[in-house]
Image (cartoon, helix red, strand yellow):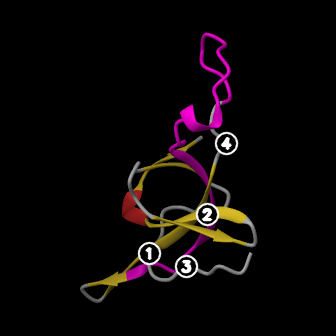
Amino acid sequence: MNIKPLGDRVVIKRLEAEEKTVGGIVLPSQAKEQPQMAEVVAVGPGETVNGKKVEMEVKVGDCVIFSRYGGTDIKYDGVEYTILTQRDILAIVG
């Protein structure tokens, strides 16, 4: 992948939406809820705040939970990604 995020931005690839409910009902594609979990595929260098370098807390390969309405969705080489700031990442899973 040739997307290199700037500053404190992170590129993520959403995990697949659930195909079935807990009760076993198969969901059509329109009824699937967008997942809020994703894999980190690229990380920016961090940012400088008040002359102090703020390091990134996530790294490539981390599974993260992110804010539902955070980020910008893009399509690159036929694959959908989301670019968001580190502040929009709520937790690292695992």
Quick one: label 4 or label 1, which is nearer the N terminus?
Answer: 1
Quick one: label 2 or label 3, which is nearer the N terminus?
Answer: 3
What is the x, y in percent for residue 12? 59, 61
Whether tag 2 and tag 3 are in contact, CB under 8 A, the answer is: no
- Bounds of the magenta span? 19-47
Residue underneath mark 4? 16
Residue underneath mark 3? 5
Residue underneath mark 1? 8
Q: Residue 78 carries which label?
A: none
| Comparing labels 1 and 3, the label whose residue is closer to the camera | 3
| Comparing labels 2 and 3, the label whose residue is closer to the camera | 2
Q: In which quarter of the image is residue 50?
A: bottom left
Q: Residue 81 carries which label?
A: 2
Amino acid type, callout 3: Pro
Amino acid type, callout 1: Asp
In the picture as drawn, the residue positioned furthest to the bottom comes out as 51
Looking at the image, which residue is at 60% across and 15% down? 22
Label 4 sits on a secondary structure element that is loop
What is the x, y in percent for residue 55? 45, 73
Whether tag 4 and tag 1 are in contact, CB under 8 A, the answer is: no
